[in-house]
Amino acid sequence: MQDEPTPIELTKSVADFLRGDIAPLISGHQAFKLRVAINILDLVTRQLTQEEGSDAAEVERLRALLGIDGSVTELNRALVERIAKGEVDLATPGLAEHLWATTMDKLAVDQPNYASYKRELGRG
């Protein structure tokens, strides 16, 4: 693993280069495909930037909700199993709040400019 530049810096630099230097030079379907590639790089940059914090918060919520420890993957699997068995539902204290917070964290990475996401951020 290299110290500098970081993966975040690399993906951001490539996206910025493509957006600023290459995009103005092309048009049509190639420009569309380039915008898709830039959007992917932007998404990866946001995921690298936000993943650690949002995963840690999700683990804490799941630990409190389920009363067990584990990785984010293990805890989500346990939650799904409990929902499937009918042991947990939206009446379970904390579940709706957990699902909402997890959805908002995912939207922050996937669709941060989504109008409904921005509106909900304003309410918090």
Image (spheres, rainbow, N blue to C red):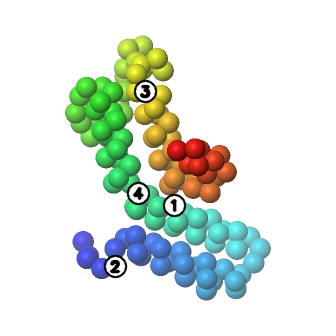
In the picture of the structure, the residue carrying the numbered disc 3 is 95
Kindly indicate whether the residue at mark 2 contacts the one at mark 1 (C-beta within 8 angstroms).
Answer: no
Q: Residue at 46% of width from left, 40% of height from top? A: 101
Three-letter code for the amino acid on which mark 2 is drawn: Pro
In the picture of the structure, the residue carrying the numbered disc 2 is 5
Nearer the observer: mark 3 or 2; the answer is 3
Kindly indicate whether the residue at mark 3 contacts the one at mark 4 (C-beta within 8 angstroms).
Answer: no
Residue 23 at x, y percent in the picture: 66, 80
Considering only order in the chain, which callout, 4 or 2, is on the residue closer to the N terminus?
2
- 54 w.r.t. 38: above or below: above
In the picture of the structure, the residue carrying the numbered disc 1 is 43
- Asked which secondary structure carries label 3, the reply is helix
Alpha carbons under labels 3 and 2: distance apart: 39 Å
Q: Is residue 73 visible?
A: no
Mark sitting on residue 50? 4
Alpha carbons under labels 2 and 4: distance apart: 18 Å
